[in-house]
Amino acid sequence: VTNIDHFGNVTKQYFHQGNESATQVGEYLDHPAKINLPYKTEIFDNQNTFFQTTINKWERTELPSLSGPQDAKRNFVRIEKTVAQTFDGNSSHKDTAQTFTYNATNGNLEKQVNLGEVTLTDISTLGTNDVGTDKITTDYTYVDNAATFSALPAQVTHTDASGVKVQEAKYYYDNQPFGTAKSGNLTKQERLI
């Protein structure tokens, strides 16, 4: 899909089609469950100068059927890695990357790692080498009531490349102790900045 804004800047997006993988351009393990998910975005200015490309690696896990083998197969599709290459108007560029880890049972995001500056080593798998100490890791925990509230965040913690805590937020619900909830109304928030 190509979009042109009113200044003439061009954004090209490439989507999974569910037919075959084009690993040489960043499409990772295509599958019908990934149809319409963007695997690549390219940005050009109004002079057709290439400025940025972002490549998304979508993973898929087949889930068991709900009631029997006659059911359609279910899939848990999630973004696992994103690599952005930013160009300065010529062929040189800086690469950045993020990775994402999810709970396979409920789909909650458990960890997001902003690797900062990297070098893209393999476009087909989005392999990278970390080149600096600018990594930030964000860990997510959720309230302990999975039957009712599987996605209410309890705590979000950011640590730097050395493992030092740089920011933290705790969430309290329904005037209950930390990590629990009754109806899911946020009643208190603590932040370490």
Image: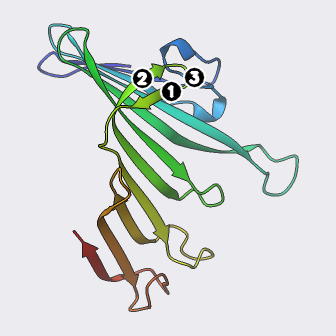
> Mark 2 or mark 1, which is nearer the start of the sequence?
2
Does the CB distance between marks 1 and 2 fall below 8 Å?
yes
Question: Is 108 in front, or is 114?
Answer: 114
At 35% from the left edge and 50% from the top edge, which residue is drawn? 161
From the image, tell me which residue sits under label 2: 120
Q: Position of residue 127 (x, y in %)?
A: 50, 27
Question: Is 88 in front, or is 34?
Answer: 88
Three-letter code, disc 2: Leu
Residue 59 can be seen, yes or no: yes
Q: Position of residue 28 (x, y in %)?
A: 57, 25
Question: Is 30 in front, or is 52?
Answer: 52
* Residue 168 drawn above or below residue 89: below
> Mark 2 or mark 3, which is nearer the start of the sequence?
3
From the image, tell me which residue sits under label 1: 127
Secondary structure at badge 2 equals strand
From the image, tell me which residue sits under label 3: 17
At 17% from the left edge and 12% from the top edge, which residue is drawn? 89
Estimate how packed mark 3 is, as few (under 14), some (14 to 19) or many (20 or more) residues with alpha carbons within 10 Å: some
Q: Real-space Cα distance between discs 3 and 1? A: 23 Å
Residue 37 can be seen, yes or no: no
Three-letter code, disc 1: Gly
